[in-house]
């Protein structure tokens, strides 16, 4: 009888060892992988947010349809597309407030393009803010780096839950860009009308960064294809610029494009660009990335790294705007979810 008892003891010990291994190793790995697969882990802090109770509709250009999305998920996907994965927390918090404000304003005052698609916003970066899912982020920076970035971005969203910027009791036009040309644009020049909180703000860290410059090269054939044009030569192109150097329009004989449409068609980083012909190719040099309006995320990173709080960063880029709770505003207008 002693031999079977000994064998049974060995088997029991083996089972206990396997269970301990699963608890210590396999379960955490499984949880980590589950977190990596989803941009919104099912945790109480995330789903209990005020942001999570608000549903907005985003037009997916690739799918050709509008889809509902919780506000906190929208803010997350915009942060993933626009912010540096190593951005300081105060910068991510400032960006969270700006993106939330942008979305709430769009829900109250949707653009013509969004209304046409029965949506509040679009995922078209030339019309609204660029978006990126966690899966797309994983493909670009890897699973572990993506997991870390998502966790930090979610923490920033949770820390600022429900906070928006207002002016005169309304959500502001909280524009932002990845990096400016060295100073942000004033609304008076960029939009053609004055907006008190959209001033031209110096961005010395942007001006000193080589990241503000980018180049794109086209052959004549590729240029014509991208523009749906029939240019015979590069020399026919002419730029019309605003007083701050941004391109308002590009003309070529009887053909013309707005600066933003031209840049979007060619995949240029901003509307501030120059070009030079080099043999059979046209080389574009772009200054800054994005609209150059509102907050520069690169400059915000620099300010946060020097100890500036997210509230101070927002006050720096949107002078005169107030940081407050969105709940009274959105409750009164009936856009809270269940």
Image (cartoon, rainbow, N blue to C red):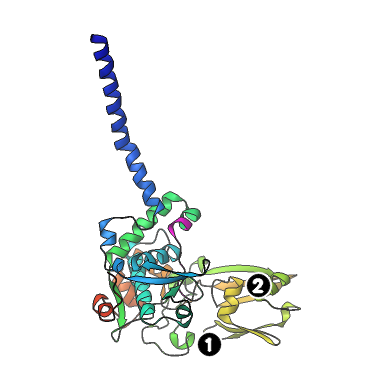
Residue 165 location in percent, x, y? 31, 78
Residue 24 location in percent, x, y? 30, 37
Magenta run includes residue 208? no
Q: Furthest-bottom residue in view?
A: 193
Q: Which secondary structure, mark 1?
A: loop
Residue 120 location in percent, x, y? 41, 76
Residue at 35% x, 63% y is 305
Location of the C terminus by quadrant is bottom left
Residue 324 appears left or right of 80 = left
Q: Find disc 1 in the rendering and name its residue.
A: 243
Residue 326 location in percent, x, y? 27, 76
Q: Main secondary structure of the magenta part?
A: loop
Magenta run includes residue 135? yes
Q: Which residues are magenta?
A: 127-136
Is residue 300 positioned above or below 21 on the image?
A: below
Disc marking residue 226: 2
Nearer-N-terminus badge (1/2): 2
Residue 43 appears left or right of 175 = left
């Amino acid at each position: 009888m002693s031999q079977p008892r000994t064998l049974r003891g060995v088997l029991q010990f083996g089972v206990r060892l396997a269970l301990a291994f699963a608890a210590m190793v396999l379960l955490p790995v499984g949880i980590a992988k589950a977190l990596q697969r989803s941009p919104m882990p099912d945790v109480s802090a995330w789903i209990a947010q005020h942001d999570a109770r608000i549903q907005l509709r985003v037009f997916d250009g690739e799918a050709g349809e509008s889809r509902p999305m919780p506000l906190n998920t929208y803010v997350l996907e915009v942060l993933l597309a626009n912010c540096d994965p190593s951005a300081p927390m105060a910068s991510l918090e400032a960006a969270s407030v700006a993106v939330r404000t942008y979305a709430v304003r769009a829900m109250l005052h949707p653009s013509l393009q969004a209304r046409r698609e029965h949506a509040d916003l679009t995922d078209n970066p030339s019309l609204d803010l660029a978006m990126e899912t966690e899966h797309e982020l994983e493909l670009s920076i890897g699973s572990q780096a993506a997991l870390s970035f998502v966790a930090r971005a979610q923490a920033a969203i949770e820390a600022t839950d429900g906070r928006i910027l207002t002016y005169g009791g309304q959500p502001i036009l909280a524009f932002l860009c990845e990096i400016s040309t060295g100073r942000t644009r004033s609304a008076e020049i960029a939009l053609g009308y004055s907006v008190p909180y959209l001033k031209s703000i110096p961005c010395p860290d942007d001006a000193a960064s080589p990241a503000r410059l980018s180049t794109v090269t086209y052959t004549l054939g590729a240029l014509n294809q991208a523009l749906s044009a029939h240019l015979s030569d590069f020399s026919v192109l002419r730029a019309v610029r605003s007083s701050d150097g941004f391109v308002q329009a590009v003309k070529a004989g009887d053909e013309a494009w707005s600066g933003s449409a031209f840049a979007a068609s060619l995949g240029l980083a901003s509307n501030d660009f120059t070009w030079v012909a080099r043999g059979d190719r046209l080389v574009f040099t772009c200054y800054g990335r994005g609209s150059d309006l509102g907050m520069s995320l690169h400059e915000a990173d620099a300010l946060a790294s020097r100890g500036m709080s997210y509230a101070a960063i927002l006050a720096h880029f949107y002078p005169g705007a107030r940081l407050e709770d969105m709940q009274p505003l959105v409750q009164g207008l009936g856009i809270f979810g269940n």
